[in-house]
Amino acid sequence: MYKLLRPLLFRLDAEVSHNSVFLFLRLVRRIPGAARLLRALHGRRTPRLPVEVMDLQFPNPVGLAAGLDKDGRYIEALADLGFGWIELGTVTPRPQPGNPRPRLFRLPRRAALINRMGFPSVGVERFVENLKRQGMPCLLGVNIGKNSDTPLAEASADYLAALRAVYNHADYVAVNISSPNTPGLRDLQNQGNLAELLRALKREQERLARAHGAYVPLALKIAPDLNAEQIAAVAQLVLEHRFDAVIATNTTLARPGLETEPPANEAGGLSGRPLKDLATDVIRQLYRRLGGKVPIIGVGGVENAADAWDKLVAGADLIQIYTALIYEGPGVVRKIVSGLQQRVRAMRCTTLREAIERARAEAR
Ligand SMILES: Cc1cc2nc3c(=O)[nH]c(=O)nc-3n(C[C@H](O)[C@H](O)[C@H](O)COP(=O)(O)O)c2cc1C
């Protein structure tokens, strides 16, 4: 079905077509029985492949990466598609329009996207209202960022404000310091800035956990463009400040093998197939540095079960996708989860974790 629709959608501007699909899905759900049909087509046909990470029970290890539902508008429609969980956002404390359009470009021959969205956001207040209206039909991560006009020196205040606002509405909160489209944001990954930010967020998380009687884990989302030394420094700080997970990775500023591809010279972050190996390499290095003490959510160019498996064996505990959903359609979630389940069975293991641990031991 999606393969039939895709040529039509790809004729539209990329952002217009993404928004139309999800608006359409949201409207279709209002037709009696339509939500049930969607769930039957995708959600229910996705096998259960449970994984426990951050003390949360994920029904399967394939989640939706941040950026597709920035304002928390399409949770119910997305939950029908079989994802193990959904990461919403990035949401900023105050509303902001993001960068001028066009700001999203397709590279169909490479199954890739370039975006310079720049965190368009309705702001945390409206975001939380959207969430309250829909409830929590599946596990939800909320990805938070800073406003583009907040000076870097005051970034912590933005992250703290966003954390407080979304705390009661998230199963975990992802701290995004790795978008390439907010000037200076990635500087927060530098050791001094990062130490201060992580310390402030950890302290606030502990205060909120006491106040609400519920511990909501914190994950840090990093860029694929860090060198080995920077990855080591990030890992050290994550351990020191007892962050609960790392999400690796965001989009890249590099253009691996894309010199001849026309939209490749557009400014922004590259996602999809050309990011795959870069992201897996970061996961591998990070895993070595974290020594398995902090879970990793692996993201970047996953298109099928083999790609997901590579990231799991490299050190990831969970997987996220975004670009593959645009190129392959919603059926890709079920395909990846089914493929992983087949591997677990072929290895005669009872859980995904057991299979990964064995494959990692054999790869050593
Ligand atoms: C159009 C677009 C918008 C994105 N927006 C965000 C965002 O707001 N916050 C974020 O943390 N990551 C964002 N990302 C990055 C994705 O979450 C993901 O890390 C990246 O695309 C790599 O995964 P993929 O190759 O499966 O797409 C965005 C990606 C795309 C393509």
Image (tube, rainbow, N blue to C red):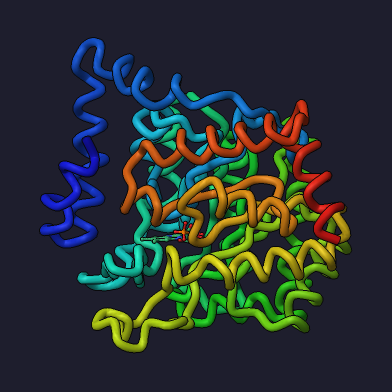
Question: Looking at the image, is 44 positioned above or below residue 356?
Answer: above
Q: Is residue 343 left or right of residue 77?
A: right
Query: Who's the residue at 37% across and 82% down the image?
Result: 258
Q: Quadrant of the C terminus?
A: bottom right
The spot of residue 73 in percent (x, y) is: 34, 39
Query: Who's the residue at 22% across and 42% down the image?
Result: 21
Query: Who's the residue at 85% across and 70% down the image?
Result: 236
The spot of residue 3 in percent (x, y) is: 22, 44
Q: Quarter of the picture for ligand 1? A: bottom left
Q: Is residue 232 left or right of residue 268?
A: right
Q: Name the residue at the top extreme.
A: 32
Residue 123 visible in the current orientation: yes
- Front residue of 269 and 119: 269
Question: Looking at the image, is 219 positioned above or below residue 358?
Answer: below
The spot of residue 15 in percent (x, y) is: 23, 58
Query: Who's the residue at 47% across and 80% down the image?
Result: 253
Question: Looking at the image, is 251 positioned above or below residue 76?
Answer: below
The spot of residue 12 in percent (x, y) is: 12, 58
Residue 214 visible in the current orientation: no
